Amino acid sequence: QPTFKASLAEPILPERSAMDKRVYRPMTETVRTFLNPAHFFALLRSHGTTFFTGVPDSLLKDMCAFITENVPEGSHVIAANEGTAVATAAGHYLASRNIPCVYLQNSGLGNTVNPILSLCSTKVYSIPVLMIIGWRGEPGKKDEPQHQLQGQLTPSMLQEMNVPYDILPDYAEGAFEVLEKAYAYMQKEKAPFALLVKKQTFEKYTLSGDQGAFVDANMLHREEILEQIISTFPEEPLVTTTGFTSREVFELRAMRGQTHEQDFLTVGSMGHCSSIALGIALSKPSTQVLCVDGDGAAIMHMGAFLTGGTVGLRNFKHILVNNAVHDSVGGQPTGAAEADFPAIALACGYPAAGP
């Protein structure tokens, strides 16, 4: 026991030998765990899942990166939107009877409603699909405004769609158990099952290479393009697409000390930027209205090109920045590296289009 000097409150501790050290059991339960993408992929393959399709998501970027680099081209399709992903997965199941995997952000859950309810449902064709859903706006977690309501409603949306779900654990044993449950359900009921993925569930995995992105040194960076647009059209209404484009326009305006009042930043509703701009242009026929779109967003709802071309407004300016990747969610390819968007626009009836 420690002893004390009579006049001081300082303890005099007994000497200990170098060998007299207490050894404590490591408190591993306090260590943060992450699910290894390769291990998770192996678990899926053990259940016969070899086909993957979907739209990349920031919470799933490590899993998506692993799939992009390790799945043969014919067994992985980065889809135009989440609905086409479900339909493509359904086609794979019809041909192979192997359960496919569809990955998406919960903001794209709405795009899946039609094929889930009118194609995969047990009341229609009974097609099992494993849905891996990034849970943006998870209650209790800080997130951007466009994700908050979507995150709150995601579990109830799945329930209303009769899609049972579970939360994917961030450790191997837990993932194994959840997948056993999911595949048992899908094999018995022949119906979709969803896994909700929380923030930082997966261990880091980084794509190697540029994945088909344009890297020519003579090409303008997106921010340089936006600077030129703002300088050329300083007062015209400007509608910008989701992701980095809207963030960078906001930052450029702030840096220049300019107002944001003529800008509409489409922070959600991916793929609908040009339709918003078209609606404004229809309502303000004497005003030039600009839309700054991205390749991934434009591909998601390409029917908007035909609508814009059919309307044929001269005051509607559709600017598309094509970097061939889903830049803001991990850099996976969009498939737009060889797409001729000006030719598509002209074919859809745009009065004029060019690079």
Image: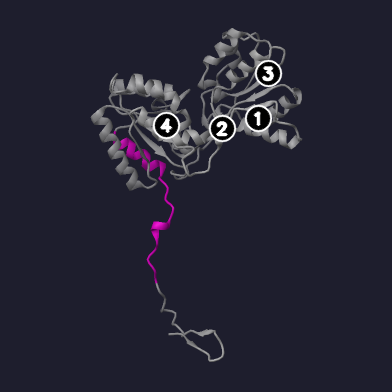
Residue type, mark 4 in image: Tyr
Between residues 324 and 240, which one lies in front from this camera angle? Answer: 240
Residue 103: mark in rendering:
4
Graded by Cα atoms within 10 Å as few (under 14), some (14 to 19) or many (20 or more), the crowding at tag 4 reads many
Q: Which is in the foreground here, disc 3 or disc 2?
A: 3
Q: Is residue 67 visible?
A: no
The structure residue drawn at horizontal position 69% and vertical position 28%, both measured from the top left corner, is 226
Which numbered disc flags the more N-terminal residue, 2 or 1? 1
Left or right relative to 220: residue 54: left
Whether residue 163 is visible, yes or no, is: yes
Which residue is tagged 1? 222
Q: CA distance from mark 4 to mark 2?
A: 17 Å
Q: Position of residue 84 (x, y in %)?
A: 43, 21
Residue 310 falls within the magenta-colored stretch:
no
Tag in front: 4 or 2 = 4
Residue 172 versus residue 96: which sits nearer the camera? 172
Q: Are marks 4 and 1 in contact (CB under 8 Å)?
A: no
Q: Earlier in the sequence, mark 4 or mark 2?
A: 4
Helix, strand or loop for disc 1: helix
Residue 96 % position (x, y)? 29, 23
Q: Which mark is residue 289?
A: 3
Name the amino acid, label 2: Asp
User: How far across and down, in percent of the image, does residue 218 sit?
Assistant: 68, 28
Whether tag 2 and tag 1 are in contact, CB under 8 A, the answer is yes
On residue 327, the disc is: 2
Residue 8 lies, with reference to residue 68, above or below; the image says below
Residue drawn at x 49%, y 38% is 137
